[in-house]
Image (cartoon, rainbow, N blue to C red):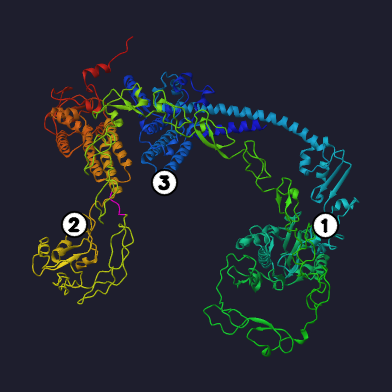
Amino acid sequence: MADLTSKIERKQERLELTKKNEGILWMNYLVDRNIIPSGFLGVLRTSLVEWLLVPPEEWPEEEEGLDDEAQQLHEQENLEESHTENGVSELYYTLLDELLEDDRYDETDHYLDFRPAPIFYVREDIYEISLEKLDNQLKEVEGILEDLKDGGYSDRNIWFFETLYDDLTYQKKCLKTCLRQVIPYDEERVEKLVTEPDVWRIDPRDRWLLYKHWLSLLQAALLEDLIQAGEDFTEETSFYEEVRHMSDLRILRERHVVGMTTTGAARLQPLLQALRPTIVIVEEAAEVLESHIVASLTKDCQHLILIGYNIPRMLNNGMHCKVLQLQHRMRPEIAELITPTIYPVLMNHSSVETYPDVKGMLKNVFFVKHNKPEAQDGESSSHSNRHEAEFLLALCQYLILQGYDGEDITILTTYSGQMFYLREKRSKHLMLHKVRMTVVDNFQGEENKIILLSLVRSNKDASIGFLKTPNRVCVALSRAREGLYIIGNMDNLTERSSSVWGEIKETLVKQEALGTHLTLRCQNHPDQVTLVASHEDFKQVKEGGCKLPCMALLKCGHTCKSVCHRKDLEHENKKCLEPCERILCALEHNCKKMCWEECGPCSYLLLKTPPCGHEATVQCHVTSDNIVCEVDPLKFGCPFKCEDRLMCGHACDKTCHPLEDPEHLEFQCKKKCARLNKDCSLAHECRLLCYQECADCSVILEPQTLTCGHSHKLKCSQDPATVKCAFKCNRTLPCGHPCASLCHKACAPCVQKVTKVIPDCGHKVNIWCSAEVSREDCTKFCERIMECGHKCPDKCFLECSVSRCNVLVPCDVQAACGHAGNILCRLAKSELAITPLELLQYCEVPCGAALECGHTCHGSCRACLQGRIHARCKEKCGKTLICGHSCGTACANDCPPCRRKCKFRCAHSRCPKKCGEPCVPCKEPCPWKCKHFKCKKRCSDMCDRPPCSEPCKKDLQCGHPCIGFCGEPCPPLCRVCDKEVVTVVFLGQEDELDARFVYLEDCHHVVEAQGLETWLGQSDGEIAMKVSGSSVTLIDKESLKLLSKNKRNNLSSHDAETLGIQIQILEQLEDAFVSAARVSNDSGKKKMIKFVDQLIQVIIERDDYLSQQEVKEINIELQRFHRLSQMITIESLYSFQTTIKQHGKMQDYEEANKVLDSIKKYTGDKDDRVNQIIRDLQSILRNSLEFHENERKEIVKAMGLKQGHWFKCPNGHIYVITECGGAMEVGKCNECGAAIGGTQHRLLDTNELAREMDNATNAAWSDTTNIENYALDVE
C-alpha cells in the first residue's frame, strides 16, 4: 500500500511540475516514452538545453515573402549562431581552468576548489534547468563572494566568481523570457518540423513549439498512468481492508477488553459479529439513544452494563440500577456540596484527603455572594454579568501570581454570553492566555485543579433559568480537584428554586465558606489577609502578596522596600535605592532614611517593657519610662506558656492560645527534627526542621570499593551497585597504550597519536594508534622522479602526473625578447605550436637594468615585463632620516619612522621614547635665564623670554673677555688667543670686532651668532634635522633657543597614498577601455583585454604599496594603453583601410601599431610620434565622414531596405536609392556637390555600390539580380 501511495504521489507531483512550466525537462523523461523522434536523438543526445536556450533577442523576426534562397541563407545564419552558443557549464570550466593554469594562482585561496556542477546537468527533480535551480546557484555564489571579500582574497579570485554570477544571472533572464513566450500551436507546422533532417536549422521559435508539443504528450501519458495507478490502488485497498479486518479480529480475540465508540461499533459491525462479545459496557449511556446501543449489540451479548446519569425510561420500566459511591476527584469540602444534595451517598478515596491547600487563599472552597444585576445580550437570549466576569479575571490573575500555571485553572460559566465576555476581556490580562474559559455543558467529563465558577443570574425576579437543573448544578460543582470558588447571587438561587441550592447554602455556611468577601492570605506573610469583594479590591494585592513591604534581602545587602510580591522572588530585577548606613544609637541601628537626609533620632521599632509589665513596640529612642501602655485590659491574652505536646513529640513554644488553633492542626513545629534521614541505614539524624519532610540521607560515608576496583565516597542513601564509576579506565589496550575512556564505559579504539611509517612512500605521519595508514594519509611533498626526469611537485597522496610539471625546460623557439626560449615541462610535449610572444611569460633571464634609485634591477625579463615595469628594488635604502639616522628598510619602501633611541634632551633629562615618536614634554621650569631676562614657562613650552643680545661679562681662563652672549654657555675660544680660528670667515661676519659667537654643545663648534640665525631660518628641501656647517653632528641642544624651540620643517613630499594611486590607475583603464569597447570589433577588444589583464595583474601583485619608479612606469604604460584605445577606435570606422590607403597613410599607421604592440619600453618620444600619427588619421577620417560599425547597422535598420540600395559618390560619400533601387535621375551630393545617381536604371560610371553598408554583392537593380529573380528550377 505504501508503495502504491508513494507511486501515485510521485506521478501526481511529476504531472503538477510539468504544468508549472518552470524549466526545461530532462531529456530522458521524453525519451523513455518514445515522445522525441529518433532523428532528434542522435543530434541532441542527452540534453535539450543548448538546443532550446537561445536568447530571445537573437530570435529572428517574423519574416514574410522570403524566397527559398533567402530563407536558406537566413536559416544558415541561425545555425551558425546556435552553434556558437556555449552552455554555462563550458563557461564554468573554461574560466576555472584558465585561472588554475595561471602561474599567478594562489594555492591558499581554497575557494577556488569550488567547482560548481553544471547547472544544465545536475540530476535533481524533473527539470534539467529551472528558475529555482538558478536562484539556488546564484545564492551560493553570492555567499562565496561575500566570504572572499571579507577574507581578503585576491581580486583575481573575486573576479572569477563575479563573472560566474553575471553569467548565471544572464542565463536566468534568458530562461525566464523563453518560458514566457506565447507561441500558438500549429499542428501542420509540428508535423513538418518533426521530419526536419537537421535539428539545428530549426528556428528557435519552432524549437519551443516542438518542445511544448512534446510536453503536452508527456502530460497526457502521465495522466493516463495516474488513472491506472488509482484503479490499482482501489483494488489493492479493498484487498488490504479485508486482510486488515482478519488481522484485527485475530488480535482482538487475544484481548480481554475492547473499546470503541457507538459510531465505530456500527461501522465495524462485521468485525463485532465475528468477535461475538458476551459482555458490553456503555459509558455515558444517558447521552446515547437506546436505538444506537441496540444497533451496536450482537446476538451473542449476554450482559449489558450501562454507566451514566439516570435514564428515566429504563428506570420507570423497572430496570436494575446501581449507584457508584466512591469518588477519586474532589477534596472532601467540595464533595460535601453535592452530598447528599445530589448524591445521597458519596464516599471519598484516601487520595483526595491529602491535596495541598490552595496557595494564597484562606479557604479551598468559597462562595462569594453579591446582588449586582445581570445584563441581557442584545443579539441573543444569553446572559452575562460584568461584575462576576471582572471579579473572576482578577482572581485568576492573583492565583497565577501564586505560582499556578494557566492550564491549572478553568473559568466555568453557565451562559455562553458570559463566556464570550470573559474571552473578550482576557486580552487585557496577558497572564491568562493559557486559562481555559468555557461553559459548563462543554466541560462535562473534564476536571482541573482549580475551578472558578460564574453563575451569572442576578435579577429582581429571582429567575435563575437552568441553574435549578440538578444535573447542570452537579456538573458545575464537581469539576474541581483542589479548589472551587463560586460567585453568584445566593439570594436569587434560594428564593424560588428547589431545595438543591438551599442545601448547598447550608453546607457552605457550615464550612464558613459563604460571604460577601473572599479572604486572601499572603504566602510571604501568612498572618496577613486581604478581603476582596470586587475586582477593584484586588488592587491591594496587585503583586500577588499583601500590603506589607517585601523586606527580602537583596544581593547588595539591603532589603527590598517594595510592596509584598510573588513575582521575581529572587529579586533579580530589583534596584536598590541605597539607604543610609550611618549608626544612630548605641544598639548600632542604621539610619532608615536616604543618605542625603538628616538622620534624626533612631526610629527603629523595638519590643520594650514599660513599668506595667506589658510589652510594647516603640521606637528605639523612646525609653521604657516614657512608654504609654495601649493594651486593652479586656483583650489581654494569657501570658502563660502553652503546655500541650505536639504530634511530633515536641512541646508547643507559644503562649496559651485557646482561640487560635487550639488543636494545633495548622501549627508548624520549628524545632530540630528528631527523626532519621530517609533511606538511612546508619541512624543518621535528620537536619531539617520538624515540620519539613525528611530528605534522603546525604551523609558521606567512608570510601567504598566498587566492582571495578576504584574507591568512591558515596552518600549513605546511595547503592554502590547503581553508581557509575567516573574514574579513568585503568585497562590496557591490545596496542599497549592505556584506555582513555571512563571506567564505566566500554573501551574505545586507541586515539593516542603515534608516529607511523607509510609503507608506500616511507614518510612518517602522526596518526591515531588504531588507524591504518596508507599513501592517502601522507601530506608531505612527493619525492618521486616523474617520467620527464623532474621531481613531482604535488603532495604525496596525489598520483604523479607529468601534466602538472611546471619546471622550465629549453625550447627551440626564441622568445620575442631575444632571449633563449624556455617553456613549462608539461607544455613541452604538446603538439600545439607556441609563439615567441607566449614564451615571454616564461623568460627568467635577469633584467640587470639600472633603476632610478641607482641600484641594479634583480628581476627577471618576465617579471619586469621586458623592462617596461621593473620589479621592485630590494636593496637596502641607506637614506638619512629626519632624525639623522640611516634608514635600513628596502629601497622601494617609504622610509618608516625611526625606531632607534631618541637623541633629544634638555638641561633636565633625556627623551625616553623612540626617534619616530613624539617626545614626552619636559614639565620642569625652564632654566634659560640671565641677569637681564628670565623665562617663566616650562621647559617644553615656547620661551616667553626674548633672546639676550648683551655680551657676556665673564672672563675666560686666559683673562680675556668672553666672546659669547649673556646667559649662554661661554665659547672655549678667545678672540685674542685663538684669533686665527675665531676670525676664519664661515658665515660672513666672523672677522668683525664686535662679532658674538654661540657655542654648540653637541658638536663643540663655535659659530658666529648672526650668520647662524640666518642659516637656521632657511627651509631645506630635505626633511632632516639641522647639522652644523662644519660637520654632520645634529644640533639639538637648548642653545638653539636663540631662534625658537624645536624648529622643524613641514613635510612636503610623497603625500599621495598607494591606494589612491591604484584607484586612479584603474579608473583611467576603465575610461579608456569603455570608450573604445563601444565601437571596437572582437580583435580590438581582445587586444585591450590582454593589455588590461597584464596591467591589473601588476597592480594586484604589488597591492601593498607602489614605489615612485613603479608609479612612473605604470603611468607610461597607461599612456600606451590610451593611445592603443584611440587607435582601436579609429580602426572600428568603416572603410578605414580604404581611406588611409587613398591618403597614403598606411605606412604611418603600421609604424604606430608596431610601436604600440611592441614589448619594448614606451618613451615620451615614441608617444609624441604615435600621437601625431593618430591626429593625422583622425583628421583624414573626420573629413571623410566615416562612421562606426554600430552606427552603420542602426542606419541600415532604420531605412528598412533590402541589400543593394546603398551607393557612393566619386569622393566616397554615401547615399541611398529607394523603391526598386535603380537610378532614374541625376542629382548632386549634398557633401561635395559631385554628380550622383543615373538614368534609366543605369548608375553613373563615377559612382559605385557601397558594399560596406549592407554587405551587398550586387545592386538591387542589376542584370545579375534581375536574372536571379526569374530563375527556374529545371531537372
SS for dot 2: loop
CA separation in Å, label 1 and label 2: 117 Å
Give x and y (percent) for residue 774: 53, 30
Q: Which segment is the magenta one? A: 894-898
Q: Is any part of residue 1001 visible from this angle?
A: yes
Residue that badge 2 annotates: 1031
Residue type, label 2: Ser
Q: Are marks 2 and 3 in contact (CB under 8 Å)?
A: no
**Closer to the camera, 354 or 914?**
914
Give x and y (percent) for residue 1085: 28, 33
CA separation in Å, label 2 and label 3: 54 Å
Q: Earlier in the sequence, mark 1 or mark 3?
A: 3
The answer to whether 1089 appears left or right of 691 in the picture is: left
The answer to whether 586 appears left or right of 1023 in the picture is: right
Residue that badge 1 annotates: 327
Task: Name the front one of labels 2 and 3.
Answer: 2
Residue type, label 3: Asp
SS for dot 1: strand
Residue type, label 1: Gln
- The residue at 25%/41% (across/down) is 1114
